[in-house]
Amino acid sequence: MIDVTALTRTYAGHRAVDDVTFTALPGRVTGFLGPNGAGKSTTMRVLVGLTPATSGSATVLGRRYADLPNPGREVGVLLDASAQHAGRTGLETLRIAARTMGLPARRADEMVERVSLTGPEARRRVKNYSLGMRQRLGIATALLGDPEVLILDEPANGLDPAGIRWMRDLLRGFADDGGTVLLSSHLLHEIEVVADDLVVIGQGRIVAQGSKAELLTAAGTLVRSPGVAALAQALEAEGVHVAPVGPDGLRVEADPDLVGRIALASATPLTELRAADGAGLEEMFLELTADTARESAPEGVAA
Amino acid sequence: MSTTTTPATAPAPITASPARAADRTPRPAPEPIPFTRLLGVELTKMFDTRSGRWLTTSVAVTALIATAAVIAFAPDTALTFDTFGTAVGVPMAVLLPVLALLSVTSEYTQRSGLTTFTLVPHRHRVVRAKLVASVLVGIVGIAVALGTGAVGNLVGSSVAGVDTVWDVSAAQLGGLVLAYVLLMLVGFMLGVLIRNSPGAIVAYFVYNFVLSTLTMALAAYQPWFADLQPWVDFNAAQAPFFDGTFDATAWAHLAVTGSLWLVLPLAVGLWLVGRSEVK
């Protein structure tokens, strides 16, 4: 359980995190989504006490992170896989963390296996690790203390497709066992496949949040009909916004149920009716972050 | 009727659905991390990296070379405990403080602090463990230097066929231990003050070698400074503690210079460690 309430972090007048409120619940994977520099990492750093909040609060398992007596045993954290001592071996890195948490050295060896690093790899210095191997080592450190909560910043970076699949299954399993997962990414697809809930952030502010199902609905419905013009008319008469897709399709800003009813009432035959997920969520993501994305920032900004 | 994307101001509440979430029985809060464990961890971390290994190896190698060199080249009259102890102790005195320095700076330069300070969110506990570890390494260091010196003295005098001379007094031993602890504290202080490995190492050599040369030169050419020097030069103030010639004035010099060159920057450094962000 992670609770972030009205969290703000200011750097020299710039609001890196601006009044952010969300909850990550046990048993669910919460995806923290946003373009680069949106404030995801800063929020996570405040959450684990590395950065003080300017105002607002952040708690993990009902307590401030700094008040956890042995944080590693309750919260697994991976903020940056590159942030490991290059002159230490992977196994030694894990042993040090295990000792800090008060766990036997054997636990480090178990974790090496759990994240599929080979024995010789674990005995190599981190300097010689690929980013993917560092991510695995970072995940191993996070899982070491058998935590109830995982806080992971861009954990899929540098992993190969098999590694991404492995990570997804691991997080799914962790949440299914009742754990809380907060996972950040700037890649929508990565989050979409594994998250139950989404928190979308842009320029420090939350622009959307809810369960994935809710947000998919919000992303609209795709409908096709031989009588597309009549259907569009009927939908607009009900005050529903539509946009044409191809010669016979419409993207409708309403859930499929409502679109189906309006089609039935107007006696329009349909050839297809479904939630515009996938592409819809991506469109939503781009749309939501459009006003806040860097690409559009320089023009038209009144000083 | 239309549904639009969730507005930013009124986020939709996230509802808990899976019953599984409740299955997990609440776990008892784990025991807090004892300081002794942190101390053990920090001691290990000083030696388990590549730089730590090389520094320790260099200390051992220079100690062996120095001892052998004394036996081979020193005149028989100089084959005393003091000579052997100094031969081993001087290179060690230069290298060991770098271990103390790196134990702090590597958390920032290698960025391992991201993990360290997340596992122990109270930074000052970690830093205190590093401080105690540094002092312990200094004390063990001088013990090893003296032990090696004693062995060298026994072997050297028997090789040369002269009487074994134990010319180090208890007071001198005490002074040496203090001097070593101060050296380690200097390394540690530069670590917390600069928090960057290359920068702190450069500062360490400037602090130990350039500064003392400058003050000596200044004292030699400027009479007004010659009187002032013992009250300003921390390196010079430590010298009597290395050779066991310290008196009340030496203590006063040490206290004044130590406040300026060690205690004050250490306080600033500790304050900065608490405030600076670990990136």
Image (tube, helix red, strand yellow):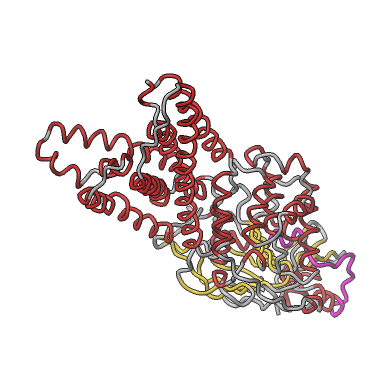
Residue A19 location (% of width, % of height)? 51, 72
A70 versus A262 height, above or below:
above
> Residue at the spot x=38%, y=60% of the render?
B271
> Residue at the spot x=42%, y=31% of the render?
B164
Residue A69 location (% of width, % of height)? 59, 70
- Residue B57 lies in quadrant: top right
Can you say which quadrant of the picture contains the C terminus of chain A? bottom left
Foreground of the two, B187 or A296: B187
- On the picture, is A200 further left or further right than B272? right
B102 versus A244 height, above or below:
above
Can you say which quadrant of the picture contains the N terminus of chain A? bottom right
Q: Is residue B234 visible?
A: yes
Q: Provide the residue span drawn in magenta.
A: A264-283
B28 versus B151 height, above or below:
below
> Residue at the spot x=29%, y=40% of the render?
B239
Foreground of the two, B251 or A59: B251
- On the picture, is A220 further left or further right than B240? right
- On the picture, is A121 further left or further right than B118? right
Q: Residue furthest left?
A: B224
Foreground of the two, B136 or A222: B136
Q: Is residue A292 visible?
A: no
Callout count: 0
Residue B251 location (% of width, % of height)? 25, 51
Residue B261 location (% of width, % of height)? 29, 49
Any magenta on residue A299?
Answer: no
